[in-house]
């Protein structure tokens, strides 16, 4: 059977492999090489060693974007997960209309980042109008605007994951705890949270990577204004590539650093999940 | 009023207690907060430019009501129907191609066990953690060199980018298909292609729906990739961004109207296949 299937490689696997090479594999290798080069187009690149990396770390916008992204990620991850968990707890009690609520909370997740950005631009500017300001008046407004937007987008999604985790807890466990006299807070700390640990790891991973890699929402809501103060990493890289002539090499170096951050987060996550699996 | 509550209580299977009512009301308030942004967009899409920025929270009245002028204005400015058609074309054809190509590829690399299929599997999994910014510049250059900067070319680019997640998910599902039934089909005279499409593909159908939904949502909403690839046409997210125009000159009234038109298809799609969407997104989440 193996040899029969192997003969069909050109039809079965080749289309995907070719497309994958064109849009991912070759650009990825080129990207690593180009991060060590000075270039305006791909064809005339000259090797400059670690120069681009040094320039990237000396670039104020990049460092600012890094801090902005980290602060934003920490705050959004905490708020999204706490709120999503609370909603999930409420919705797993057999209340009337829970399905309708679930449908409503999940909906914003389907709307694209650009559209989301402009929805909230209108609302936040509408509120700030009463204080004679706009979202670009102050970087703090942009920061909290992005946090609110991301919460609105992701709470429903994370909530669905928490709900399935909570529903998997065996009712016997809860009953036993109740008989032993554990109050609802003790049951939450000692049974619910440890039992939904797999859901918590998935949700943390999704919220961290989503917030860290955010581009569209940032681009539509503040576009980095005022100045470049609300620019996140992805937007800073984009602007380095397409906004400054002669900085493509630095842009690519920033992109490699960005990739290493994301990979580090993903691998840490994988490591933690594996360890959990061994324990249980 | 009290009687009505009583009647309702009797109808429901598990009667709600006082505490549950409080929770129920809290949930309704939260739901209103969740829907409010979309209602606000809808409301403001019927107001004049000035009123959108000065009193966005007021209902349209005789003074601020502008009829359909925002819609007409926006549709003309961004060539809405052309953008809508481009988005639809790219999404539909990319999803069809991704489903066909990656399911076959996943079957191939799961059934054939040699060094290069193992390598491919690792590469597909690896592609999922690489952020788009890492490859966007060289990718746009490669696409340009190969003349893929049009609606058909971008479909191939999407196949390449979608391959990571899609092959990974399909490979997981193929593993659960017993090899014995494939062997039986082959003994009965089916070639590999017929075996895959007549035996495996029907079994993989639910997973194909999952993969289709995940990719459709991504491609329909994608902004940056088409911006870098397409040279003469705009997708819907690109058209909406185009309304921003020069620095600080956003026509928010036309913007609101276009947002309404952009959200309506998503909401219809959501209500038609809600069950699959939530299931699909959950399956996609596990990939981490």
Image: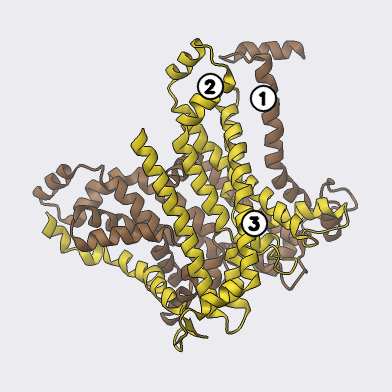
Return the mark for residue A115. 3
Q: Relative to B12, does residue B233 appear above or below in the rendering?
A: below
> How many numbered dots are placed on residues in this image?
3
Which-is-in-front pick, marks 2 and 1? 2
**Where's residue B171, x and y in %?**
30, 51
Looking at the colours in the rendered structure, which chain would you say is drawn in yellow? A
- Residue at 60 percent of width and 32 percent of height: A86
Q: Which residue is mark 1?
A: B24
**Where's residue B144, x and y in %?**
46, 79
B156 to the left or right of A183? left
Does the image show residue B229?
no
A66 to the left or right of B249? left
Quarter-wise, where is residue A231 in the image?
A: bottom right
Looking at the colours in the rendered structure, which chain would you say is drawn in brown? B
Q: Relative to B108, does residue A95 appear above or below in the rendering?
A: above
- Residue at 82 percent of width and 55 percent of height: B52
1 and 3 marks in contact (CB < 8 Å) = no
**Where's residue A194, x and y in %?**
47, 30
Residue furthest right in the image: B63
């Amino acid at each position: 059977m193996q040899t029969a299937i192997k003969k069909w490689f050109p039809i079965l696997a080749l289309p995907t492999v070719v497309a994958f090479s064109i849009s991912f594999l070759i650009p990825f290798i080129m990207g690593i090489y180009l991060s060590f080069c000075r270039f305006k187009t791909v064809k005339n690149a000259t090797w400059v060693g670690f120069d681009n990396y040094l320039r990237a770390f000396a670039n104020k916008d990049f460092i600012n974007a890094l801090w902005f992204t980290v602060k934003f990620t920490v705050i959004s991850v905490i708020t999204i997960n706490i709120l999503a968990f609370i909603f999930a707890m409420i919705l797993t009690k057999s209340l009337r209309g829970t399905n309708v609520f679930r449908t409503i909370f999940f909906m914003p997740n389907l709307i694209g980042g650009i559209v989301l950005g402009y929805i909230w631009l209108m609302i936040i500017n509408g509120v700030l109008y009463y204080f004679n300001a706009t979202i670009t008046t102050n970087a703090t407004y942009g920061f909290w605007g992005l946090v609110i937007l991301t919460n609105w987008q992701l709470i429903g999604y994370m909530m669905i994951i928490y709900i399935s985790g909570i529903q998997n807890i065996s009712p016997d466990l809860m009953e036993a705890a109740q008989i032993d006299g554990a109050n609802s807070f003790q049951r939450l700390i000692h049974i619910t949270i440890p039992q939904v640990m797999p859901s918590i790891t998935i949700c943390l991973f999704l919220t961290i990577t989503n917030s860290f890699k955010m581009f569209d929402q940032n681009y539509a809501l503040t576009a980095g204004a005022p100045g470049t103060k609300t620019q996140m990493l992805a937007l800073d890289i984009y602007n380095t590539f397409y906004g400054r002539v002669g900085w493509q090499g630095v842009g690519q170096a920033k992109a490699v650093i960005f990739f290493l951050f994301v990979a580090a987060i993903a691998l840490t996550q994988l490591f933690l999940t594996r360890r959990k699996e061994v324990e249980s | 009023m009290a009687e009505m509550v009583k009647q309702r209580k009797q109808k429901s299977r598990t009667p709600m207690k006082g505490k549950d009512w409080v929770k129920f009301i809290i949930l309704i308030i939260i739901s209103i907060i969740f829907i409010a942004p979309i209602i606000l967009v809808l409301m403001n899409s019927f107001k004049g430019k000035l009123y959108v920025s000065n009193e966005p929270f007021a209902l349209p009245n005789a003074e601020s009501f502008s009829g359909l002028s925002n819609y007409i204005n926006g549709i003309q400015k961004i060539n809405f129907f052309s953008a809508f058609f481009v988005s639809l074309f790219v999404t539909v054809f990319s999803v069809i191609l991704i489903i066909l190509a990656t399911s076959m590829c996943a079957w191939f690399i799961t059934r054939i066990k040699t060094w290069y299929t193992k390598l491919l599997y690792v590469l597909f999994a690896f592609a999922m953690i690489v952020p788009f910014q890492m490859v966007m510049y060289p990718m746009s250059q490669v696409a340009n060199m190969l003349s893929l900067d049009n609606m058909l070319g971008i479909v191939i680019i999407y196949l390449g980018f979608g391959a990571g997640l899609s092959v990974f998910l399909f490979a997981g599902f193929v593993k659960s298909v017993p090899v014995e039934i494939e062997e039986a089909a082959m003994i009965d005279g089916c070639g590999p292609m017929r075996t895959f499409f007549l035996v495996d593909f029907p079994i993989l159908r639910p997973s194909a729906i999952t993969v289709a939904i995940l990719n459709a949502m991504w491609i329909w909403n994608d902004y940056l990739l088409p911006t870098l690839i397409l040279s003469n046409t705009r997708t819907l997210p690109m058209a909406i961004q185009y309304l921003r125009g020069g620095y600080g000159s956003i026509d928010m009234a036309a913007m609101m109207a276009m947002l309404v038109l952009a959200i309506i298809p998503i909401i219809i799609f959501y209500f038609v296949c809600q069950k699959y969407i939530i299931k699909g997104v959950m399956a996609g989440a596990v990939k981490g």
